[in-house]
């Protein structure tokens, strides 16, 4: 007999079926016993009746522990009083793998286990349907983003994670011994993205691990995260990049509503999309924040509180969960970003904020080799020490730009999770190296 998933039992009413899963709950009464069974598709109430269940199986239920794996043969029947609308009357039950007691964590919705302990036993934690829903949605996010970028003419590439090239400003590198030679875990695929725009692909993207050796102890930072990075050639300016990102997020939210409806409902998540994502220059954002008591120096970026407050203002003013902040000071941005023609003190750059947190950073890149070299020197860098990078601009580089996202942050903010580690199966931070 082939296994039936719990979500499909409604198609097999009054027929004998085989179901398998984990025991979420057991309730023992004298002449009736209940088991709430759980598989990847959901949960279902099953019941053993002394008159209808195999006598040995009826007694076995007395010894079944929570989270044991069992196999049940039974008959699904309609029950309008049940929250599922149906229930399965057990004929026989077999314990495939008993769970030890006590469980190291409480993975029920009533549980108060702190996140650090839950992460120590993540495989038990994700048996909770709500926790599982987070990662089903995350998987759909990857699928939808991939489909969108593919439809827009992007090619998926894979770039090295062991590298000697590092270009991100302010981010430290993890050093690795590579057969006696020092190399580093990649903190960004930036150089490689530009390399293959110049290599004729024109549009490339990668979804892969990114490493940042920063001792940040916040609910939004990780030392290893999944980056969604793309680069596109033959643009007019950074607005073309923002236009694509806007279309991408509109496509993402709309398709999630179709493809992950049940999971979103389970988590109580809904979103309302604006007609267009508002775009504020950093100076405009700072002026709006003055009314909230936040003041910044001319070349200062927004801090976490400022990002939260500007999103509250935008939500009230434009009814948008998203906002682009543009034209950041040259003083705080990497040398490879293009300066604005009208104001050389800022770059053609942007951040995308979602519900109070920056989830994306991007810009138009400098493609003119002499300007590129001059800007490197202005930042105290030696262009000749970056020969592999410099070479990209010496044999024909189109106007181009791109962006980098954190898949973990996208998931966290779309689902309204308090901590980014909730959106990562096995997170890495300055203290956590296991499991």
Image (tube, grey):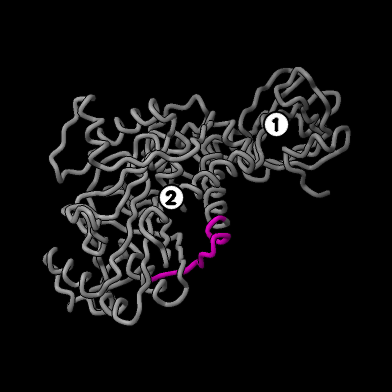
Point out the residue furthest to the front here.
342
Tell me, yes or no, if residue 363 can be seen here.
yes
Residue 153 is covered by the magenta coloring: yes
Between circles 2 and 1, the one closer to the viewer is 2
Which image quadrant for residue 237?
A: bottom left
Residue at position x 68%, y 22% in the image: 28
Q: Is residue 275 left or right of residue 314?
A: right
Quick one: 406 or 215, which is closer to the camera?
Answer: 406
Crowding at mark 1 (Cα within 10 Å: few <14, some 14-19, many 20+): many
Q: Is residue 91 above or below residue 186?
A: above
Element class at badge 1: strand
Residue at position x 35%, y 35% in the image: 356
Residue 402 is covered by the magenta coloring: no
Point out the residue furthest to the bottom here.
395
Residue 140: x %, y % from top left: 57, 48
Q: Which mark is residue 407?
A: 2
Residue 298: x %, y % from top left: 14, 42
Point out the residue furthest to the right here.
14
Quick one: 12 or 153, which is closer to the camera?
Answer: 153
Q: Is residue 223 above or below residue 267?
A: below
Residue at the spot of label 1: 44
Q: Is residue 33 left or right of residue 52?
A: left
Crowding at mark 2 (Cα within 10 Å: few <14, some 14-19, many 20+): many
Lower sequence index among marks 2 and 1: 1
Residue 243: x %, y % from top left: 45, 51
CA gap, disc 2 and disc 1: 32 Å
Residue at position x 68%, y 29% in the image: 35
Residue at position x 43%, y 33% in the image: 320
Residue 71: x %, y % from top left: 72, 42
- Disc tally is 2
Q: Which residues are magenta?
A: 148-160
């Amino acid at each position: 007999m082939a296994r039936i998933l719990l979500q499909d039992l409604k198609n097999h009413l009054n027929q004998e079926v085989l179901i398998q899963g984990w025991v979420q709950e057991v309730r023992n009464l004298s002449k009736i016993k209940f088991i709430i069974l759980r598989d990847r598709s959901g949960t279902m109430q099953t019941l053993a009746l002394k008159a209808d269940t195999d006598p040995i199986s009826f007694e076995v239920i007395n010894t079944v522990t929570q989270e044991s794996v069992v196999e049940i043969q039974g008959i699904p029947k309609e029950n309008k009083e049940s929250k599922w609308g149906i229930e399965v009357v057990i004929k026989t039950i077999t314990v495939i793998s008993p769970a030890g007691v006590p469980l190291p964590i409480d993975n029920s919705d009533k549980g108060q286990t702190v996140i650090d302990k839950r992460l120590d036993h993540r495989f038990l934690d994700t048996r909770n349907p709500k926790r599982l829903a987070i990662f089903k949605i995350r998987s759909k996010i990857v699928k939808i983003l991939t489909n969108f970028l593919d439809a827009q003419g992007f090619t998926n590439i894979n770039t090295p994670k062991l590298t000697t090239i590092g270009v991100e400003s302010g981010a430290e590198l993890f050093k690795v011994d590579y057969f006696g030679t020092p190399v580093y875990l990649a903190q960004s695929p930036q150089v490689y993205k530009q390399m293959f725009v110049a290599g004729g692909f024109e549009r490339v993207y990668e979804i892969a691990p990114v490493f940042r050796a920063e001792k940040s102890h916040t609910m939004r930072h990780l030392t290893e995260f999944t980056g969604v990075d793309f680069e596109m050639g033959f643009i007019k300016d950074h607005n073309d990049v923002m236009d694509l990102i806007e279309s991408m997020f509109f496509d993402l939210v709309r398709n999630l509503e179709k493809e992950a409806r049940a999971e979103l409902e389970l988590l109580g998540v809904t979103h309302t999309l604006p007609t267009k994502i508002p775009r504020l220059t950093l100076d405009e954002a700072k002026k709006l924040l003055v009314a909230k008591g936040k003041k910044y120096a001319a070349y200062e970026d927004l801090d976490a509180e400022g990002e939260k407050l500007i999103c509250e203002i935008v939500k009230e003013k434009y009814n948008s969960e998203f906002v682009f902040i543009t034209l950041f000071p040259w003083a705080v941005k990497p040398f490879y970003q293009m300066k604005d023609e009208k104001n050389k003190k800022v770059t053609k750059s942007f951040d995308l904020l979602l519900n109070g947190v920056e989830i994306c950073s991007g810009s138009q890149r400098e493609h003119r080799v002499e300007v590129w070299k001059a800007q490197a020197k202005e930042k105290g860098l030696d262009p000749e020490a970056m020969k592999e990078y410099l070479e990209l601009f010496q044999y024909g580089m189109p106007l181009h730009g791109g962006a980098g996202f954190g898949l973990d942050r996208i998931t966290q903010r779309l689902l309204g999770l308090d901590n980014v580690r909730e959106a990562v199966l096995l997170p890495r931070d300055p203290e956590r190296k296991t499991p």
